[in-house]
Amino acid sequence: MKDLVPVANSIPEAVLTTEDKKNIEVILNFNLPMQPKDATKLYDYSILVKNKAKVIKEMARRYFLQRLNPIIYNMALDRAIECGELVLKAELTLSTYLKQIKTRKGMRTDLSEKENKKIEKRIKDQYKTKTQIIKDEYGLTKQQAKDISMLEEWAVEKAIAQGRQNREIPTRTMAIRMIKEKIKEENNKPYNPDAKYMDHVLYPSEVMSLPPIRSTTLCSNVGIGEFFLEYAHVKNVIAAEFEADRVEFYKTNYPNVKIFKGDLFDKNIQKQVIDEHIAQGCKLIIATPPCQTVSLAGKRDFNDPRTKLFLPILNIIEAVDSVNDYVLVENVPPYMTASPKGLQYILEGKTIAEYIKFRLEKLGYEVNIDKLNGANYGTAQSRERMIILASKKGMWKFPLPFKKQITLMEAIGDLPSISPKMNYDKYYSTPTLTKEEIDMLRHTPTGKSAWDNAKEYQPKNKDGSKSGSDRKGRFKRESWDKPASTITSDCGSISGMSTIHPGRPVVDKEGNITWSDPRVYNLEEKLILLGLSIDKRWCNNKPCFQIPDWASDKLINDVLAESFLPRLAAVLAETIPNRTAHPDEKLEDYPQIITPKPNEFLFYNMYKGRIFYPVVEERLRNYDLNTEYDKQQYINKIKMLVHKKLEEVGLKMNGNLTSFDI
């Protein structure tokens, strides 16, 4: 520890009070034990240092607030900073040990208590779970161990350096904040700096004049992702799905689409899809293989056969090479970097995305890969997805992000509050909660987790004990001023990740504040947050997406969580380059967006029976970026007019419009 004796001796004795002299003696005699070598004693050591430091910290605080001797204040602060550094270093050492503890399955639960007692202690220790080891050997709770395990050497060193520079006590919170800021910074970086984007935003008139083409979807789920493709003049005519209930669900909305039920690894299924794709003259394949095997929200089981689904998908793409021009693959971001050990005999060191790119380029496709967030493309949900665009007819570029995101308030803020006691309705009801759960959520403010509540209103198990789902992202209300969090398969549970309605403050007669809507999102809200709706029709009088009455809540939540955002799919399809129209598809049969003036809406609704509902509202499009594009389009238009006039008089215009030839 720093030698403060010279500093103390430099203070003139005449200015020192009796209390000052006692405090100087406390500071100079302050000492701490050495950090223990036994890892299980490290947390106790950090608590000991913190407790001993309280006296010094309080002294420094009092000298600062009461503007007492500044030299003594700085001496006390030096000691407090040193204590903070010792605690942080001890916790960093402890974190290395905690990270080495392997996850275990725990004791068998199928044995009787008598049988369990017969098992020797050494066997019991062998089957301890990671949580039990952390509690029994290190004296830590699950949350404490989680926080300490987050520490990294660079962050601890940076926190200590910042503490010395800014004269503040370094803490674990400070180091963890630096780690989170770095993670956020890394996540905000573009996945692929070389990804190609459009240089302008397509106008509705340009979208409506796109040559119509046909497509095939693989791993089609229930068809949510393709619902708006007609808006971009893509007609999906073939689908393939493994799950029987999803096939029936799919047929509810697409009775005229040829859907094949079966495993894509089945050569017979592959042949049927291939033959139909060629017969229908399809030019685009959209593949959305299941994400559970690589998603951070899933089990990340790379041995799951579904991880290999990219292989039969590539086989189908190769087999239709003579007619196909475009490929779109959608999956979760970890798909970018996943390179499972069990697949190295195929991948040869490549990630799955790199391998797909490699195979497509061998077929002559130009491949464009990046990570997109659906919230940047007209959907009120933050949902990051890896997108691979491949084209044989020029680079298929990504659309430019929209100028604003849709917030929860804009998306569902006009919907009424719902009582947890309402009668059952498929679209509006939510799962039944206990009185304790309702009280807990009524005391949870907008944007906060129930874990931030007073202890009596924090999550509990049925027996009254503390809930094990102690992550701050669980039991959390959403915020009105942002898009919704990613909808996951646990969206029907209040303990899911950010699944609870934002709620509105309610003030009673005594001035007490609680919050309305103690519930998860209902089905209507979840459909809206996916970009769909149950009470609107879009352009060309297209019916709304239908949920079959027989579908269970679990099935509905699963298919919504695993879906390709339909508005993102449509916007991606807009930028397909150099299309050739399918000979049997007529442009007039596709949606034509008409935007009546505000006072004309009633007229259109009454006399034509149609509500004009654009897939992506024009107000979200970033047309401000089109300045150079508009200028060039104007020049091209003038050139064409001049060229036409010159031809009429027998003259020929040269390329730069500055002279002409006779």
Image (cartoon, grey):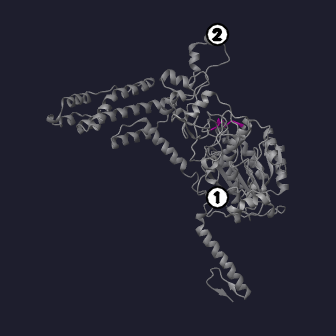
Q: Is residue 55 left or right of residue 109?
A: left
Q: Look at the image and tell me in which quarter the N terminus lies.
A: top left
Q: Residue furthest left?
A: 14
Categorize mark 2 by other alpha carbons within 10 Å: few (<14), some (14-19), many (20+).
Answer: few
Q: Main secondary structure of the magenta part?
A: loop
Q: Residue at x 68, y 36 (%)?
A: 430
Q: Can you tell which quarter of the image residue 166 is in?
A: top left
Mark 1 sits on what residue? 399
Return the x and y of residue 63 as percentages of the image width and height: 27, 35
**Residue 440 at x, y percent in the picture:** 57, 31
Q: Residue 388's spot in the image, x, y percent?
A: 67, 52
Q: Residue at x 60, y 66 (%)?
A: 626
* Residue 236 lies within the magenta run: no
Q: Nearer the viewer, mark 2 or mark 1?
A: 1
Residue linked to disc 2: 114
Q: Is residue 238 left or right of residue 642?
A: right
What kind of element bears circle 2? helix
Q: Tell me which segment is drawn in magenta.
A: 297-304
Residues at discs 2 and 1 in contact (Cβ within 8 Å): no
Q: Is 647 drawn above or below residue 199 in the view shown?
A: below
